[in-house]
Amino acid sequence: MSESTPPNPHAPASQRVVDRATYDQVMVPTYAPAAWVPVRGKGLWLWDQDGRQYLDFTAGIAVSGLGHAPDAVVAALHEQAQRLWHVGNGYTNEPVLRLATALTEATFADRVFFANSGAEANEAAFKLARKWAHRRHGAGKSRLVACANAFHGRTLFTVTVGGQPKYTEGYEPLPPAISHVPFNDLAAAEAAMGDEVCAVVVEPVQGEGGVTPATREYLLGLRALCHRHQALLIFDEVQCGLGRTGELYAYMGYGVVPDILTSAKALGNGFPIGAMLTTEDLASAFSVGAHGSTYGGNPLATAVALKVFETINQPAFLARVRAAGARLQGLLKALVTDYPQVFAGVRGLGLMLGLVLAEAYQGRAKELTRLCEAEALLLLIAGPDVVRVVPPLIVSDDEMDEAMLRLRRALTSWVGQT
Ligand SMILES: *Cc1c(COP(=O)(O)O)cnc(C)c1O
């Protein structure tokens, strides 16, 4: 639309002039979006309605691993869009079969169920665990053990498993038979286990909860506990999967294999898709009609995800993520050294990093990301005390250096004003 087009309330909706103020008039207010509206993206860069350019270190919340509008994925989307979008699950389709083949060949899994989001992938995982336990052991084996401060999605079941009271408040009654234990505390997990537990679910690297990697001992310990109690181990790799930690899936770096793994976010690079991966034996608990999704596994989403997956699942690509992650972690550590009053440290794996605020600055992560936004650098928070740094996996050395310049400018104004 040209700049001279006046706002016209009678124009067709597709031609209306809209801006951030429109959000407050027509949207259910579940979000507090930025004051500007992005209209275009390429690689690590975003442009708003006024043509201002931003360096995007959020990757659309750890989604766009290949950056905005990657050429090869755009081409795969166009090609499939001209061929076939949707047929419903009364028919299978070629892209979904190719994607499932690629996922099973590359992982522990033998079978895949497709959904449209991370929450739905987890919903499928939790339902499969219950169904499997019912069939194998009877109705009494139904309790899920999950971690406090976790995040598994926003359906009533998944948000309850996530165990963050701020997200379940007011939605009671919540689904029962879900216990929460502190993350990385094996003794607490052991105390919570019992023969009535059907599954333990954990994020190998907690994302929303603060970018906290599990220890290897913790995941190994959970694996052993699950064996002992005939419970399933579920890894939620919705955020940490697909190359984010420098491994195709984080479990591979830990050397601890789950029974069920969920994947979403980066799998579609922004096109909605989720996947639940599992073994032949477990998959057989889901017989025809046991679960489903209208859009799950549609040819458009799976053609996009197949191109994304093939791009990320290359030794050279993953080696570059590890190198980029080490470099970025080094740059962030230098920042911690230079601003010891502001930062307590850096944690994370690969390109999933968190800058942890020191005690004097706790609760103020959002303030710092706002100042960075004023420098046209986009960063996320992970709770009130952690700045989350999850750039697209294709981030260049120059883009990292540019981000550090902008972050240092923001810090100068922040520390100056306090
Ligand atoms: C984002 C996220 C989810 C939820 O995914 P949606 O696509 O928003 O439903 C689940 N688990 C983890 C670890 C996540 O980071």
Image (cartoon, helix red, strand yellow):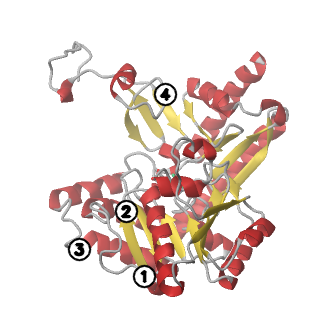
Q: Position of residue 199 (x, y in %)?
A: 59, 73
Q: Amino acid at mark 1?
A: Ala
The residue lying at 50 percent from left, 73 percent from top is: 130
| Quadrant of residue 203 within the rendered picture | bottom right
Q: Position of residue 110 (x, y in %)?
A: 44, 82
Q: Look at mark 1 in the image and give the residue it sits on.
A: 285
Quarter placement of the N terminus: top left
Mark on residue 115?
A: 2
Mark 3 or 1, closer to the camera: 1
Dot 2 surroundings within 10 Å: few (below 14), some, or many (20 or more)?
many
The residue lying at 69 percent from left, 76 percent from top is: 194
Q: Look at mark 3 in the image and give the residue it sits on.
A: 92
Quarter placement of the C terminus: top right
Q: Contact, CB < 8 Å: mark 1 with mark 4?
A: no
In space, the residues marked 1 and 4 are separated at their CA atoms by: 45 Å
Closer to us: 101 or 412 = 101
Task: Tell me if residue 294 can be seen.
Answer: yes
Q: Is mark 1 within 8 Å of ligand 1?
A: no
In space, the residues marked 2 and 1 are separated at their CA atoms by: 18 Å
Instruction: Say which element carries label 1.
Output: loop
Closer to us: 380 or 80 = 380
